[in-house]
Amino acid sequence: MAYDVLMVTSAQFWIVAAAPFYIGWFLSTRTVWPDWQAVLGLVIVGPMIAGSTLAYNAYTDSRVDLFNPRKAHLAYVTGWISPEVVLNLARGLAFAGLVLSLLLGWQFTVLVATGGVTLQNAGELIQAGAAAISAAGELVDKKALAEKKYSIIGENAKKFVAEVKKARGGKS
């Protein structure tokens, strides 16, 4: 089961989030060995937030991953781990990361979800703990932009605002 959880959260990619955090910490402190706050930050951005993001990706891509020879055998693709468990793992990691980040101050706590944000998952991301979302890819319709039909982009923005508001219980 531990192996399966590591595969769902794509543990091999946690470094992609943790390395820039460590580099930023190193450049700002000029200290090689991290203190407890830096270690906690590494845990939050690596296993917690990156793990949550990658588990959510596994949840949304499981039907497509069935046709990917590198992933077709994994427990979340074959159904050994249910989609609900994968989604709850993503939510749990995001929540744990959010709670732990409070130890580092409110500046560290504010989460912004970027990459893969769609109108269909915007509300779920807010409910999972994101303070904001970045939805440029789906928000800005390339055809509408090319044709200078900016009202379509405005309508898309209104739809995203409505989804976020609904996820927050009617509050902006």
Image: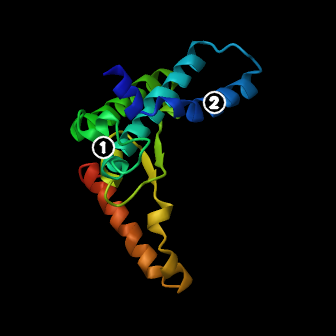
The numbered disc on residue 111 is none
Which quarter shows the C terminus?
bottom left
Three-letter residue code for mark 1: Gln
Vertical comparison of 172 with 159: above or below: above
**Which of 46/64 is in front?**
64
Q: Quadrant of residue 85?
A: top left
Query: According to the image, label 1 marks what residue?
Result: 127
Q: Secondary structure at mark 1?
A: helix
Q: Can you name the residue that lies furthest to the front here?
A: 69
Q: How far apart are the alpha carbons under marks 1 and 2?
A: 27 Å
- Label 1: few (<14), some (14–19) or many (≥20) C-alpha neighbours in 10 Å: some
Q: Is residue 166 left or right of residue 97?
A: left
> Looking at the picture, how far across and down is residue 128, in whole percent?
33, 40
x, y percentage for residue 91?
A: 32, 35
**Image side of residue 123 versus residue 54, left or right:** left
Amino acid type, callout 2: Ala
Q: Quadrant of the N terminus?
A: top left
The residue indicated by pointer 2 is 19
For the point 58% across and 35% down, which residue is it? 16
